[in-house]
Amino acid sequence: MEDNTKDINPNSSKPEDKDNKKKPVSEGRRDAIKALATVPVLGAMAYGVYKKRKSEVRYNASSEMFRFKSDVAPLPAVSADDKIIRLGLIGFGIRGKQLMQGLGFATPEFVEDLIQQSKKDSSNNAYKDFVEQEDLRVEIVAVCDIFDTYATEAVAAGSNIHREGKNGKLGTPPKKYRTYQELLADPDVDAVVIATPDHWHGTMAMAAANAGKHVYVEKPMTWTVPETYLLRETIKRTGIVFQLGHQNRQIEAYERARQIIEKNLLGKITLVETGTNRNDPNGAWVYPIHPDANPKTVDWKQFEGDPERIKEYLDYMTSANLAGYVGPEARDKFSLERFFRWRCWWDYSTGLSGDLLTHEYDAMNQILKLGIPSSASSSGGIYFFKDGRTVPDVLQTVFEYTDRGLTMLYSATLANQFNRSRKIMGHDATMEVGSTLTVTVDPQSDQYREKIDKGIIKPGEPFYTYVPGRSVDAVTTATEKYFAERGLLYSFIGGKRYNTTFLHLKEWLQCIRTGATPSCNIDRGFEEAITAHMGTRAYLEGRRMYWDKEKEEITRG
């Protein structure tokens, strides 16, 4: 990519300012520092970052418009004086392991694998990042998983307090519970991290809050519409600190994007386009089946779910007479395929809407403050993966925000990984945002007409480009590539790479200590859950769903 750092001074009236050329080197550096210091996050490290990554922040047209002042302070370092928070982890599957790593814990086998990767490839920083990750001052005192092997691994991870490999010394092991109720009854547990299948999220989060435990729960927030209201009421009544697992809240580029919107640099926004493209078995939820799993090592009855939630779900599915619904009989039969690939069935899953659309929606809600849409319509189907699943592998959902004159379009396929950026389209410019950010001026812009006519801005070319970091080592699958391109694996702050899950968990823990409100709190969670449920119901019932803002309820078209 062309390095346009010669235009870095936003006070210059033209890309090649003659006065700028005559300045001594030291004065030019002072100008660069002054300009960069107005950009959020860089702060005191601005000049070092400027020297190190000159092409990361580029102004293709000089303008005061891109002098940002951040109102979001970086998270302070955890002090040795901070109280240790005692955590319980419920669920140690794919996401549970990632959350444990975000907290600073992993099995010795996992750490050993990182060590070997770093020896084979010196550019692979995954091990270095993990061992240097800040100590969050937490203890894993209890774990729970209904698959014996995962539960044993969770104990090993929680014991690995020094982040060592196979020859490392382990600490005191956390207590192992077979049921989440037993874990929540443990007085030594201050807070819980919930990483179970979708159909357990709301039930467990409510039980934890009622037990006085702070809650971090993975997205989507809830499995059904009724429990969405119940969970919100429970969190507000108990006053515990709640964080929903949308780690995109910690991505530096999104904060920059929000400020661009607030300055109205795109003009009137009418269309937002976003989506999900993945094309491998893992991306389509066809996960491997563990060889240790069998009816003796898996608690199938507990996996099935809370009886009241199951009845509520079955009543809805049968009353709606939905095409393709297989009925309740399959739920009673032990199935390793369903246990490990639960995202493929409505019986446990929220489908593309709850699993992947929620990432896209929450990113746009963070930037645009969208809230709940006035209506939702969906279409799609099971077009590629003819494996008995009931959730679609292709989905299109359109959310209308009539009070804002705005449409958000989400589309997804699990059988093609062509990269599509998130686009926010305004009358004057379009912003594409993921792990990077670009703003391109529209040829018919009114706001930039004078600069276009003078040749200062070239329509169709990036007007502003922000690239906070490029390292994507250890990214191998289409799914990982998707998350990396969305900025969901790493965020770069002050030139340093951070695990976004670590940052999101750190924010939650800091809020527990200080009484502050997390960025993805229960109100943002309620907006996410209702929006996703509107999209899901629109697909299942084949008709538009509406949101009655006054009554706070979903109605059918």
Image (cartoon, grey):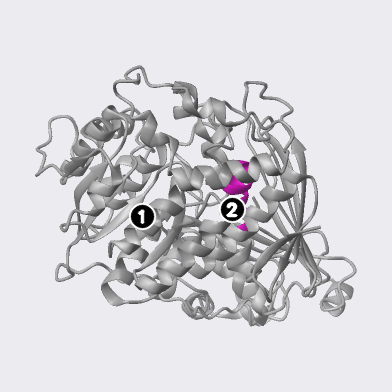
Q: Is residue 482 above or below residue 268?
A: above
Structural crowding at the residue carrying mark 2, measured as other residues with C-alpha within 10 Å and reported as few (<14), some (14–19) or many (≥20): many
Q: Mark 2 = which residue?
A: 358
Residue extent of the magenta highlight: 351-361
Quadrant assignment, res 280: top right
Image position, residue 245 (x, y; %): 45, 55
Q: What residue is drawn where x is 60% and y is 76%?
A: 9
In the displayed structure image, the side of residue 246 where residue 505 appears, left or right = left
Q: Is residue 276 above or below residue 468?
A: above
Image position, residue 151 (x, y; %): 26, 34
Q: Mark 1 = which residue?
A: 502
> Mark 2 is on which residue type?
Thr
Q: Is residue 219 above or below residue 54?
A: above
Quadrant assignment, res 13: bottom right
- 119 or 51: which is nearer to us? 119
In the displayed structure image, the side of residue 337 where residue 84 appears, left or right = left
Structural crowding at the residue carrying mark 1, measured as other residues with C-alpha within 10 Å and reported as few (<14), some (14–19) or many (≥20): many
**Distance from label 1 to label 2 (Cα)?**
20 Å
Q: Is residue 367 above or below residue 496?
A: below
For residue 519, say whether it is visible: no
- 112 or 65: which is nearer to us? 112
In the displayed structure image, the side of residue 294 where residue 368 appears, left or right = right
> Mark 1 is on which residue type?
Phe
Q: Please tell me whether mark 1 sits on a helix, a strand or a loop.
A: helix
Q: What residue is drawn where x is 20% and y is 38%?
A: 155
